[in-house]
Amino acid sequence: MKSKITSPLLLFFFVFFFTTSSIAQEEEFTTDELFQKARIAAFDEDNYPKAIELTQLALEKSPSYADIRIFLGRLYTWTDKIDSARVAFERVLNENPGHEDGSLAYASLEYWNDNSEKALEILNTGIKTNPKSEELLLLKAKVQKDLQQYSEASNTLNQLLKINPKLTEARSLGESIRNVSARNQIGVDYEFVNFENRFDDPWHLASIDYSRSTKLGSIIGRLNYANRFSSNGTQLVIDAYPSISDTFYAYLSGGLSSSGSIFPDYRVGASLFANLPAAFEGEVGFRMLSFDEETWIYTASVGKYISNFWLNARTYLTPDEENVSHSYALNVRYYIAGADDYLSFGIGTGISPDDNTNNILYQDPYKLKSNNISVGYRMSVNSTNIFFINAELEDQEYAPDTRGNQISVGVGYFKRF
């Protein structure tokens, strides 16, 4: 009987002894040592309760240690203790107004919890103190996009890219914003096409377009005009870029023409885009052109930001009863400043259904071949005025085993408002 009573007492004694001994040992560590142990518990051991306990012990020693309290706030964030996280972050910012890491952590918490208005308020205060903080500016652009403040988000990204032109995540975000952004935009462009020996008369193509941003994404109406074969034709096209999520957006297009000899009688198209990690973007989709018969073309592309460069590789596949014809293109942009300031270069083979200059060749049953090279320049003035110019040289097969060069030069302007 005596041993049965003593055993629980001994067990209690040993547990109490080792627990108090462990706490005493932890209290002997310095603040920085406790902080390091807390980080190991969180990141290496995936033990958030232990990390919180060690962080609290460190703060008992150094209550005003901002980095440790920010870490405690992040631990609360990761364990869904949102109110406790807010208390930690607010104390840091009350004691250190505009603290860079504290502002980033607190604004991220609010952004992740669908409180972008509060996040923007925190970021604006942090940026006043840290005007060149790349992390704060990048998060601000994301928050502004979430609030559908697209013009402001573009301005924030331009400010960020002036600080670090090689920040690929900023360029990728800017491209995503442009696809769902400008509240209003009107543009005009003109292209002149001259032929070496295929036709005596040059071609003239022009267009005017208007786009409007909506809650679902941007919608664009475009009127195309062409003078070919000594005759005129027009085409009305509606494009839309509906936003699906932060990762996905789509492209939808439909068009009707007044003359099937110059433009397709009608056309439709659709693509799904994905903003992928590491500043990649992917796309899959289709185009359909209707002349005397319908031609279905399938497309896929992958884009990547690398430093100041954007690279995009694309293919068009056109199946018929006998085989599948292939078209390939590589386009490169070198960004000089903001999202609308760049030099471009392209090389390709085959015909693109999105190219109004040559897509009429899809009605030819013979699989015509071509090679092309292009250069261009695009620049912005005061962020809302965009000018561009491009030139292309194409070695085009316009009849079986009959080739000729064609040169095209295009200029354009559009205004955002």
Image (cartoon, grey):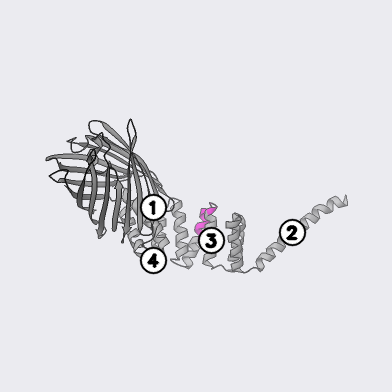
Mark 3 residue type: Phe
Please name the residue that numbered disc 1 is placed on: 304
Q: Nearer the viewer, residue 355 or 126?
A: 355
Residue 191, position as x, y percentages in the image: 18, 49
- Decide which of tag 4 and tag 1 comes sooner along the chain: 4
Within-10-Å neighbours for mark 3: few <14, some 14–19, many 20+: many
The Cα atoms of the two marked residues, 4 and 3, are separated by 23 Å
Residue at image x 69%, y 65%?
A: 25
Q: Earlier in the sequence, mark 2 or mark 1?
A: 2
Q: Which mark is residue 132?
A: 4
Give the mark nearest the N terminus, 2 or 4. Answer: 2
Dot 1, how many residues are within 10 Å of its Cα: few (below 14), some (14-19), or many (20+)?
many
Q: Secondary structure at mark 4?
A: loop
Q: In whole angstroms, how far apart are the C-alphas of marks 3 and 1?
A: 33 Å
Amino acid type indicated by mark 4: Lys
Q: Is residue 118 above or below residue 395?
A: below
Q: Is residue 290 visible?
A: yes
Mark 2 residue element: helix
In the displayed structure image, the side of residue 29 where residue 155 appears, left or right: left
Element assignment for label 3: helix
Is 32 rendered above or below residue 304? below
Q: Which residue is mark 3?
A: 71
